[in-house]
């Protein structure tokens, strides 16, 4: 029979063809009117500015596996796609465009700027969606949402107003993280901390009315311009007599009090601490306790303002250098120590942030967090792996109010209007035209927008049409599973939990699966600066999407980072080729075969048939179990082992005798089993390798009645004959074949050379098993003369292997050319002996051992172990050969 499968698998044409067919056929579409049980996932919306990276590739591959599996398992599946408007990042992109044109957003105005952003989005934004399609993502693209689209904007405003009406949103003048570059507030989660080398300056503040000084230490000496107190511990006897006195703040000559507070660590520095309430979070809280003045010394760009005395107009770092120099000139710089501390940076532009006193909008999250904590505690939402529960709880129990206002233009504008007549704030679902209190039309809308994560927090229900009570919400909410990285557990997962429970009175998802990071082959985080980034699109171009997906799945062990290299991806491309070739072989041997007549229960199956069908059933059970438990690597490992080893290496070889023989019944029997195994294997593999499995499945006879493999049922093992005893008998035969092959390999017997084998069994039962499998032993072990029995005549000199109750004896005479084999072994021994001596000498060098990196030492020790083991095997082989002379 001719097969319409090409000799080699070329993924690119296949991927384009089938993805278009799936989309055109509406196979990804979710039907909210379906009576099937629902399964739903919302995609973690990538930034509209983003391009596909390894984190996206892993995250979406795992989601796609779950969705394809559940569709085939009889569920109505909604995989909701979309992108996030990424407020700060997107605004930065468009501002750079304007700067290149010699303009900026303030020149063109807010309205024109927003138009430019929408224009950029329509022309360049969202390219990651097309890249996800190349990966094979089976999202319902007809439902694609954007966090700034009309429906989601309505949901955002509704939630803001509800929270405001419930007293959970308020406005306050508090210390926030401020980015001088982006000119906006940031939440704690948007600040990345990095340890950097710096200095600790020790400054001397004169105590008024005495000849004493208080020495305070700081990493930001310019902030002293805003000091409003010096604090000491009330238990510190060194300063007990100074509490209540005042010091003269140098350079600005302002008197500030000495206060006592338990916050001060007596052991750090001098035990006296400068207090700058407007520029330090801890100082801000201490300042509230002591009713201290809050003096802001910076403007929004990090420039010293009018409160900075002689340093007004200077950049914060310029002012730092000048303040230090002036203090030194006055003899008020005690000392400077090298110091390393965690410096906060803006997560978008990497500018060092400033704690900054500002009037902002906040969400009071503690009441919301309480419900989100309970939902995990009582099991309504399960976090997998469970170890992440502790991280979730630690953060939620200590949660701080969420600053949600951002001083940018791109985003959901805060629906609050300020009355110029009476000063009242009007918060409204509709655009306000008059003050809600006095009725004055002189109102101005707040210029700030909401934190991007505010709209993302509503994603599981806003994307389905909330606040309207839609059929989609009724069918698909709460969602079944959320697949995400641990890095947005707080940014996103916790906030979705809080908002879902608040707005829907239900958790947003039943399971949260937290996957690990994709790192390079050495376990390092990928970064452009290190030059170790692997581009998913380049990988797909070179190896195909299926090989890439299988690689990611194979290494997606729960709680363990993935170490990825192109060598590993190449290995799984070889796996795809193996599957392809096995499929071609099968189809080339289905001449005259009709799948409609298959009735495995009525066939006289051989032990080999029973073995492969039993192993298929076990594979189905293991795959189902591992997918249900989010053990993706176990799923891939199970399918890989069955495909490559059980099916390709063993059963296809065992099938050849019947396929090429003269017995039509035996041929039909093997055709039935081959077809059954391959067809079900393709369905098992489809969620991980969608393209190649569709291409092969469509070429199989009898499958055209179903438009796509996606619409075929996921195998459940029903109707497959299971014979554990028959499978065990076949395993014993295969163990004998393996042992014979091992000896052939050790003795370097040419692959086509027939050998003699004697099988000495301990029981007649075992003799019967091996005699039933004699054909397989002869065929796969390349055995000509085969003797099987109990207490058989044993050859005088033989290579021996023992497998359970069977002793395998392969007479050495005639196996090899003794003289030539002796020469070969002696030559090989000489090479290996040199390796052993080299690594032994190297590792005996104390200087080398002391200075070499641990990974180099481990690698060399491994090489020494391998060389020593090889030397032992070669010596044993040489002794056997010399015994024949």
Image (tube, rainbow, N blue to C red):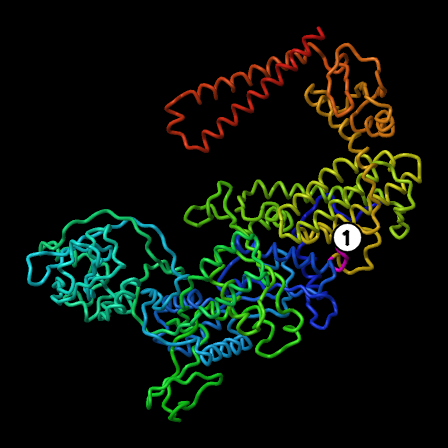
- Left or right relative to 443: residue 325: left
Region of the chain picked out in magenta, as a range: 710-715
Between 503 and 654, the one lying in front of the other is 503
Magenta stretch encompasses residue 834: no
- Left or right relative to 883: residue 122: left
User: 614 above or below 45?
Assistant: above
Q: Position of residue 95 (x, y in %)?
A: 39, 68
Q: Quadrant of residue 698?
A: bottom right
| Quadrant position of the N terminus in the picture | top right
| Quadrant position of the C terminus in the picture | top right
Asked whether residue 122 is in view, the answer is no
Residue that appears at 48% across and 21% down: 839
Asked whether residue 401 is in view, the answer is yes
Q: Position of residue 90 (x, y in %)?
A: 44, 67
Between 340 and 875, the one lying in front of the other is 340
Q: Return the residue found at the far bottom.
A: 439
Residue labelled with disc 1 = 716
Q: Position of residue 644 (x, y in %)?
A: 71, 39
Residue that appears at 37% across and 76% down: 171
Between 653 and 6, the one lying in front of the other is 653
Q: Secondary structure at mark 1?
A: loop
Q: Quadrant of residue 329?
A: bottom left
């Amino acid at each position: 029979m001719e097969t319409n499968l090409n000799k080699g698998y070329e993924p690119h044409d296949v991927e384009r063809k089938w993805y278009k067919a799936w989309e055109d056929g509406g196979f990804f579409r979710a039907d909210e009117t379906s009576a099937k049980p629902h399964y739903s996932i919302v995609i973690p919306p990538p930034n509209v500015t983003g391009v596909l990276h390894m984190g996206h590739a892993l995250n979406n591959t795992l989601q796609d596996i779950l969705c394809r599996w559940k569709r085939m398992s009889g569920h109505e599946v909604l995989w909701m796609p979309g992108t996030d408007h990424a407020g700060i990042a997107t605004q930065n992109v468009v501002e750079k465009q304007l700067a290149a044109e010699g303009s900026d957003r303030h020149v063109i105005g807010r309205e024109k700027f927003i138009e430019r952003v929408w224009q950029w989005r329509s022309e360049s934004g969202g390219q990651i969606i097309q890249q996800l399609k190349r990966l094979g993502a089976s999202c319902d693209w007809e439902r694609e949402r954007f966090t700034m689209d009309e429906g989601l904007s309505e949901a955002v405003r509704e939630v803001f107003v509800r929270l405001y009406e419930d007293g959970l949103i308020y406005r306050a003048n508090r210390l926030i993280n401020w980015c001088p570059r982006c000119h906006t507030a940031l939440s704690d989660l948007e600040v990345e901390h990095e340890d950097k080398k710096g200095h600790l300056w020790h400054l001397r503040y004169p105590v008024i009315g005495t000849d004493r000084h208080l020495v305070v230490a700081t990493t930001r000496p310019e902030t002293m311009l805003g000091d409003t107190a010096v604090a000491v511990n009330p238990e510190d006897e060194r300063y007990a007599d100074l509490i209540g006195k005042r010091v003269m703040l140098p350079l600005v000559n302002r008197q500030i009090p000495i206060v006592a507070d338990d916050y001060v660590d007596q052991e750090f520095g001098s035990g006296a601490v400068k207090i700058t309430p407007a520029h330090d979070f801890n100082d801000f809280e201490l300042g509230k306790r002591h009713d201290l003045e809050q003096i802001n010394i910076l403007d929004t760009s990090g420039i010293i303002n009018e409160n900075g005395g002689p340093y007004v107009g200077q950049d914060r770092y310029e002012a730092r250098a000048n303040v230090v120099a002036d203090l030194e000139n006055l003899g008020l710089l005690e000392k400077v120590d090298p110091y390393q501390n965690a410096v906060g940076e803006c997560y978008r532009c990497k500018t060092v942030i400033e704690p900054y006193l500002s009037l902002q909008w906040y969400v009071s999250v503690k009441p919301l967090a309480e419900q989100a904590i309970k939902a995990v505690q009582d099991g309504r939402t399960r976090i997998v792996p469970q170890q992440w529960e502790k991280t979730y709880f630690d953060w939620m129990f200590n949660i701080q109010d969420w600053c949600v206002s951002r001083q940018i233009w791109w985003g959901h504008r805060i629906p609050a209007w300020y009355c110029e007549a009476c000063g009242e704030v009007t918060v409204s679902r509709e655009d306000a035209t008059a003050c809600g209190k006095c009725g004055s039309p002189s109102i101005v809308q707040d210029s700030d927008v909401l934190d991007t994560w505010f709209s993302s927090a509503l994603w599981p229900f806003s994307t389905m049409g909330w606040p309207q009570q839609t059929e989609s919400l009724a069918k698909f909410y709460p969602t079944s599973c959320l697949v995400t990285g641990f890095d947005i557990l707080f940014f996103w997962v916790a906030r979705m939990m809080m908002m879902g429970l608040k707005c829907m009175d239900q958790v947003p998802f039943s399971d949260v699966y937290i996957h690990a990071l994709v790192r390079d082959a050495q376990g390092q985080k990928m970064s452009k600066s290190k030059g170790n980034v692997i581009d998913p699109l380049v990988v797909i171009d070179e190896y195909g999407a299926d090989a890439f997906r299988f690689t990611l799945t194979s290494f997606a062990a729960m709680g363990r980072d993935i170490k990825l290299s192109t060598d590993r991806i190449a290995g799984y491309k070889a796996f795809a080729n193996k599957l392809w070739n096995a499929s071609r072989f099968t189809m080339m041997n289905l001449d005259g075969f009709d799948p409609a007549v298959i009735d495995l229960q009525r066939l006289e199956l051989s032990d080999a048939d029973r073995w492969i069908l039993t192993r298929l059933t076990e594979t189905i059970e293991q795959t189902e179990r591992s997918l249900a438990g989010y053990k993706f690597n176990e799923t891939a490992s199970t399918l890989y082992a069955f495909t490559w080893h059980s099916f390709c290496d063993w059963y296809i070889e065992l099938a050849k005798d019947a396929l090429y023989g003269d017995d039509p019944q035996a041929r039909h029997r093997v055709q039935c089993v081959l077809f059954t195994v391959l067809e079900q294997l393709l369905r098992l593999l489809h969620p991980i390798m969608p393209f190649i499995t569709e291409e092969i499945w469509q070429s199989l006879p009898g499958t055209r009645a179903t438009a796509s493999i996606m619409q075929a049922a996921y195998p459940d093992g029903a109707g497959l004959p299971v014979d554990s005893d028959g499978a065990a008998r076949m395993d014993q035969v295969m163990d004998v074949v393996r042992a014979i092959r091992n000896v052939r390999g050790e003795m370097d017997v040419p692959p086509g050379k027939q050998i003699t084998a004697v099988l000495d069994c301990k029981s007649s039962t075992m003799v019967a098993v091996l005699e039933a499998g004699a054909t397989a032993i002869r065929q796969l072990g390349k055995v000509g003369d085969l003797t099987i029995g109990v207490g058989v005549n044993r050859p005088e000199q033989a290579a021996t292997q023992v497998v359970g109750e069977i002793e395998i004896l392969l007479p050495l005479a005639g196996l090899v050319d003794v003289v030539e084999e002796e020469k070969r072994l002696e030559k090989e021994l000489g090479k290996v002996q040199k390796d052993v001596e080299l690594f032994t000498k190297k590792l005996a060098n104390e200087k080398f051992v002391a200075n070499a990196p641990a990974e180099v030492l481990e690698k060399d020790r491994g090489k020494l172990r391998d060389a020593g083991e090889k030397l032992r095997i070669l010596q044993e082989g040489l002794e056997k050969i010399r015994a024949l002379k």
